[in-house]
Image: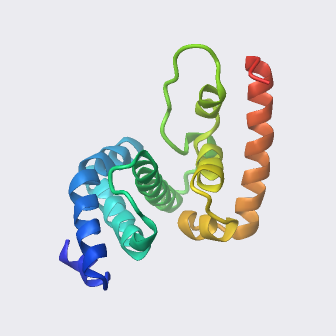
Amino acid sequence: MLCYLMAIESPADQTKFEKIYQHYKGLMFHVANEILQNEEDAEDAVHNAFVKIAKDISKIEDVTSVRTQHFILLVAESEAIDLYRKNHLRNKTKYLEALAGLIVPMEGAPSLAYCMGKLPGKYREVLLLKHYHGLSFREIAELLHLSQDNVYKLHQRAKSKLQQICEEEGVL
């Protein structure tokens, strides 16, 4: 953890980062391991996620809020997916966008959250980063290691797919 703290200048931000590290490291590992199915790779993904979080620590206000938890898990998920892609590109295996992200079980009557859960992971991720976390296309592109044009196109496709799912489920 010392390597992360050295990148953070403010003592208040260092304390905040320590709380985030202690509170979320296990959950982040679980998310990464679900995607990668390999503990060593999951540890690498979590490390990369903490590096990104350390860079943007000043943007996080409340360590235990649902919004912070969601953001941190999205970063961990994104890093795990990136590592998954890199590993599979080396093996010449095509990455399927539909596999990106965790499966979100939703029960009960169809709602917007239910429809979001039916989206492919990458679509859901882009929509949540844009509309729930308020990130710009540039910030999302940096976070997901994609071009800004690619993020914009994913966003358009995600909105279209979400509208289609909502209409099919009778939400709209």
Side (left or right) of 95 relative to 17:
right
Residue 37 can be seen in this image: no
- The image's colour scheme reads rainbow
Q: Quadrant of the C terminus?
A: top right
Q: Is residue 142 visible?
A: yes
Q: Position of residue 146 (x, y in %)?
A: 63, 66
Q: Where 99 sits versus 141, above or below?
A: above
Residue 52 location, quadrant: bottom left
- Would you say 40 lies left or right of 158 here? left
Instruction: Please state if 71 lies on the left or on the right of 149 as rendered.
Output: left
Nearer-the-camera pick, 88 or 125: 125
Which residue appears at 37% of the width and 67% of the height?
48
Is residue 99 depicted above or below 110 in this figure?
Answer: below
**Which of the pair 145/136 is nearer the observer?**
136
Across the whole image, how many numbered discs are drawn on residues?
0
Give x and y (percent) for residue 109: 61, 14
Residue drawn at x 25%, y 84% as measured from the top left: 6
In the image, residue 29 lies at what x, y percent? 29, 50
Q: Quadrant of residue 142?
A: bottom right
Compare residues 37 and 163 and report the one nearer the observer: 163
Residue 123 appears left or right of 37: right
| Front one among 82 and 6 | 6
- Outermost residue on the top side: it is 108
Quarter of the image with the N terminus is bottom left
**Relative to 127, is 40 above or below?**
below
Residue at 65 percent across and 51 percent down: it is 131
Residue occupying image coordinates x 49% and y 56%: 78
Residue 71 percent across, percent down from the top left: 46, 54
